[in-house]
C-alpha cells in the first residue's frame, strides 16, 4: 500500500494522499507568452475526486484530488482552449474520472485511456463516444512493475479498427530493449515526455539518440516536448531541458505535442509553476509557425481531426 493511503475500493472509503505527495501549485503565474487561439494542452490528468472516483487498488501512489473544474480553470488561466486528458496509473483501467471530465468540457477535452485486453467492443465504443482517441502503454517500473507486453499487444489489436493511437511512456535508458517491441506496434505511436532522456549527459545522451533514431525511422512516431520539471537537473527555469526540446521541435515540427502534465504527480524535488512552463514555449518553439504547429495544428490532427478542413 502507498504510505498514508487507505484502500481505494470502489464504493468509497476515505482515501488519504501519500504523506510525501506534493500538491500542485496553488497559484500559477499568468504567462507572458500568449498561446495562439485554439491551443491544446495535450498532456494533463484528472485525479478523483476520490470520494466519487476511487483510486485503483493496484496504484503505486495516491495523489491529491485534481478535478476537472480545477483543470479547466487552469486551462483558461494559461490562455489555452483545449485539453487532452491522459489516464494515469492511479486510476488503473477505470477511466470514469477522465470520461466525466471530458463530458464536462463542452467538447474541449479528449482523452487517452488505459484499457484491459478483455474490454468489450461495446465498452470501446462507449470510450470512443466519450472522447477517447488513444490508449497509453506505461513501461515505468515505479508505476506499473513489469509492463504486461502480451496484454499491450492484445489491446493494440483491439483498438486497431477505431483509428486510435498508442501513447508510450518509458525511460530512454530502457529504449534499447523496448525498441523492437514498440516498433512492432501498429499505427501512430506518441512518445511521452521526450522519451525521458538523461539530462546530465547533455543532448548527446545515448538514450536521447535512440529516441531520435526511433523518430527518424518512421513518420508514425510522434513525441511530446513536455515535462521539463521531471527531467531537469538544473531546476527552474529548466535551461538544461531547452536544447533537447528545441531539437525535437526543429526536426519533427509536424509530430510534436506540448502539455503541462498538470497536476504533476510524483514530483519530489519541487512543484512547477504552470505559468512558467508556458513561458518556456517560445524558447523551444522560437517562431510563430512552430508554435502554431506544436500547440494547435498537430494536436488537432490527432485528437479533433473532424474539425480540420
Ligand atoms: O504525469 C505523468 O505523465 C507522469 C507520471 C504519472 C503517470 O504517468 C501515471 O501515473 O500513469 C509520472 O511520471 O509519475
Image (cartoon, helix red, strand yellow):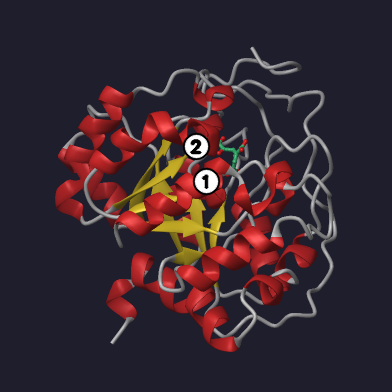
Q: Which quadrant of the figure has residue 41?
A: bottom right
**Within 8 Å: ligand 1 and the Cβ of disc 1?**
no
Question: Residue sitting at 62 percent across and 40 percent down?
Answer: 49
Q: Quadrant of the N terminus?
A: top right
Q: Which quadrant of the figure has residue 206?
A: top right
Q: Sequence-wise, which precedes: disc 2 or disc 1?
A: 2
Q: Is residue 233 above or below residue 220?
A: above
Q: Quadrant of the C terminus?
A: bottom left
Q: Residue 31 at x, y = what percent? A: 78, 74
Q: Residue 169 at x, y = what percent? A: 48, 40
Q: Is residue 187 above or below residue 152?
A: below
Q: Which quadrant contains ligand 1?
A: top right
Would you say 219 lies left or right of 240 here?
left
Q: Is residue 61 above or below residue 185?
A: above
Observer able to see residue 92: yes
- Write down the residue under mark 2: 170
- Write down the residue under mark 1: 195
Q: Nearer the viewer, residue 56 or 200?
A: 200
Marks counted in the figure total 2
Question: Regarding mark 1 in the picture, which secondary structure is present there?
Answer: helix
Question: Regarding mark 2 in the picture, which secondary structure is present there?
Answer: loop
Q: Residues within 10 Å of mark 1 (few under 14, many from 20)?
A: many
Amino acid at each position: 500500500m502507498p504510505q498514508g493511503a487507505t484502500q481505494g475500493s470502489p464504493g468509497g472509503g476515505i482515501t488519504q494522499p501519500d504523506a510525501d505527495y506534493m500538491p500542485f501549485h496553488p497559484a500559477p503565474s499568468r504567462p507572458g507568452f500568449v498561446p495562439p487561439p485554439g491551443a491544446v494542452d495535450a498532456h494533463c490528468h484528472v485525479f478523483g475526486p476520490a470520494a466519487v472516483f476511487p483510486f485503483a487498488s493496484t496504484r503505486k501512489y495516491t495523489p491529491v484530488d485534481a478535478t476537472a473544474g480545477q483543470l479547466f480553470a487552469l486551462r483558461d488561466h494559461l490562455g489555452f482552449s483545449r485539453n487532452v486528458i491522459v489516464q494515469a496509473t492511479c486510476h488503473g483501467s477505470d477511466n470514469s474520472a477522465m470520461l466525466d471530465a471530458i463530458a464536462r468540457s463542452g467538447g474541449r477535452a479528449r482523452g487517452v485511456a488505459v484499457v484491459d485486453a478483455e474490454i468489450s467492443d461495446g465498452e470501446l465504443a462507449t470510450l470512443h463516444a466519450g472522447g477517447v482517441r488513444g490508449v497509453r502503454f506505461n513501461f515505468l517500473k515505479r508505476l506499473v512493475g513489469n509492463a504486461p507486453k502480451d496484454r499491450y499487444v492484445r489491446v493494440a489489436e483491439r483498438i486497431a479498427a477505431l483509428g486510435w493511437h498508442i501513447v508510450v511512456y518509458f525511460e530512454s535508458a530502457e529504449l534499447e530493449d523496448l525498441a523492437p517491441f514498440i516498433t512492432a506496434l501498429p499505427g501512430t505511436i506518441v512518445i511521452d515526455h521526450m522519451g525521458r532522456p538523461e539530462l546530465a549527459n547533455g543532448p548527446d545522451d545515448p538514450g536521447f539518440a535512440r529516441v531520435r533514431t526511433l523518430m527518424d525511422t518512421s513518420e508514425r512516431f510522434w513525441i511530446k516536448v513536455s515535462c521539463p520539471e521531471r527531467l531537469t537537473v538544473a531546476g527552474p527555469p529548466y535551461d538544461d531541458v531547452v536544447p533537447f526540446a528545441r531539437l525535437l521541435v526543429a526536426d519533427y515540427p509536424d509530430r510534436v505535442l506540448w502539455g503541462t502534465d498538470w497536476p504533476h504527480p510524483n514530483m519530489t524535488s519541487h512543484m512547477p509553476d504552470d505559468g512558467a512552463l508556458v513561458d518556456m514555449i517560445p524558447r523551444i518553439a522560437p517562431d510563430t509557425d512552430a508554435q502554431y504547429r506544436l500547440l494547435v495544428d498537430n494536436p488537432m490532427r490527432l485528437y479533433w481531426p473532424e474539425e480540420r478542413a
